[in-house]
Amino acid sequence: MSIDVRLVWPVEALLGEGPVWVPDEAALRFVDIKRGQLHRYMPRSGTRETFDLGGQPSFVVLAHDGTLVVGAGNRILSVGSDGVTRAVVTEIQMPAHNRTNDATVDGQGRLWFGTMDDEERRPTGALWCLDQGSLHRIGGEAVVTNGPAITRDGRTLYHVDSGNRRIWRYAIGEGPSIGDPEIFLQLTPHDGYPDGVVLDSEDCLWVALWDGWGVRRYAPDGELLLTVALPCARVTKIAFGGADLRTAYVTTARVGLDAAALAAQPLAGGLFAFDAPVAGNALPAAVLPV
């Protein structure tokens, strides 16, 4: 299958991440962690907006009240559509060198997110769940966490240990909690590092490949179904958008690339899109504490 990838915003993100489709805005939201920015891309009009949040915003999802939920540093923030922080939802008790990273929301409105060592040296990152007003440390310790992604039935969670090139799969239990880990995928140095992941409407897992020049689609049994090549190495995550959720948007990064690498991949850090072979899933809104 031939996939045509197009550049939709040459934003030159240092560390583009956390893309999410916001239906009420008909827009894609994403962050640049290292520049402290929140971006909005509206494909119908081509409008591109950037909001300076400061800090290191690592993910953005929609909240049930129409605001945005942003993870940044050791805090979960409530942010308005105008990029202004409304409130601190919660603070995470963790080492000072840690920060939030990737996130998702399940069908109950619970926010699942990972933390990581910002220096990328110590296995002090973990998986967390914000269940309305209650914050739970779930497990899944790693230096750099990515994902998580949750199946449509809410029973299974994929969790990425990027440094070890490994993706784990867990059964979700009560509490919330997770069961015993199962290795879903082990990549090789040739593949790059698994970064952000997302599930489509057939419960196939899309994996962005840091230093892997693309994204891959895997069946629930781990079979590689599709590879989509991109014109830059550091691919971070995809999100499905558009009215039919058939447009895949891809964030990338240019952080850590030297002058020669940037000359070879001048589109690094851009926002890309392609027409997906299947639809994605609408991400539920997070239910915040009252």
Image (tube, rainbow, N blue to C red):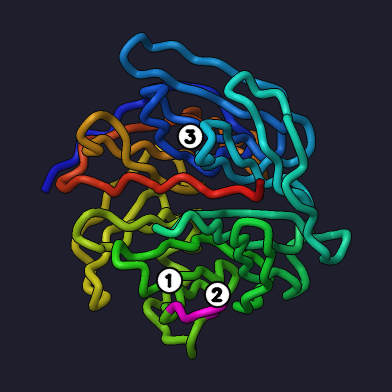
Q: Which residue is mark 1?
A: 157
* Residue 170 in picture, x, y percent from top left: 44, 80
Asked if marks 2 and 1 touch (Cβ < 8 Å), the reply is no
Among the 4 quarters of the image, the one containing residue 131: bottom right
139 sits to left or right of 35? left
Residue pictured at 65% horizontal, 21% vertical: 51
Q: Which residue is mark 2?
A: 176
Q: Which residues are magenta?
A: 172-177
Residue at far bottom of view: 180
Residue pictured at 75% horizontal, 55% vertical: 99
Mark with earlier residue (1, 3) = 1
Density class for disc 3 (Cα within 10 Å; few <14, some 14-19, many ≥20) is some
Mark with earlier residue (2, 1) = 1
Residue 265, numbered label: 3
Residue at far left of view: 1
Among the 4 quarters of the image, the one containing residue 161: bottom right
* Residue 266 in picture, x, y percent from top left: 50, 28
